[in-house]
Image: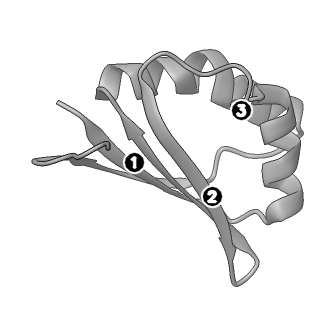
Amino acid sequence: MAILRLIRSNEGREAYDAVAAIVDIEHKHPLGLIMHGATEVNGKMQVAEIWDSKEYARRFDEEHLWPAVEAAGLQRDAEITIFELDHLVTP
């Protein structure tokens, strides 16, 4: 079942860009990722993702996201909320 994952970071755009450059999600599409979007709200980054499953998201975190966060010299202090989707339309 697909999931919606919301990530609220205490970091701003500069930190997001540093991690994004390492992960390179635009060119290296992670297995199971359906959608990724990010925006800055009041100086803090917020990310919304849709994944095929919790397992794909967990694997991405362990293999790519957390190593990139550490390589950028940042802390793992993001608040992550996961919702199972009852309905998803991808035109």
Residue at 74% x, 46% y: name it.
75
| Nearer to us in this view, 20 or 34 | 34
Give the mark nearest the N terminus, 2 or 3: 3
Q: What's the residue type where badge 1 is placed?
A: Arg
Front: mark 2 or 3: 3
Looking at the rendering, which quadrant does residue 20 occupy? top right
| Dot 2: element | strand
Q: Position of residue 46 (x, y in %)?
A: 59, 63
Q: Is residue 1 left or right of residue 23?
A: left
The residue wearing badge 2 is 38
Residue at 66% x, 21% y: name it.
64
Q: What's the residue type where badge 2 is placed?
A: Ala
Residue at 33% x, 47% y: name it.
4
The residue wearing badge 1 is 5
| Nearer to us in this view, 72 or 46 | 46
Give the mark nearest the N terminus, 2 or 1: 1
Q: CA distance from mark 3 to mark 1?
A: 18 Å
For label 3, the crowd category at 10 Å Cα-Cα, with few meaning under 14, some 14 to 19 and many 20 or more, is: few
| Dot 1: element | strand
Q: CA distance from mark 2 to mark 1?
A: 12 Å
Q: Position of residue 15 (x, y in %)?
A: 84, 53
Looking at the rendering, which quadrant does residue 32 occupy? top left
Which residue occupies the extreme bottom position in the image?
A: 42
Front: mark 3 or 1: 3
For label 2, the crowd category at 10 Å Cα-Cα, with few meaning under 14, some 14 to 19 and many 20 or more, is: some
Q: Position of residue 71 (x, y in %)?
A: 87, 29
Give the mark nearest the N terminus, 3 or 1: 1
The residue wearing badge 3 is 26
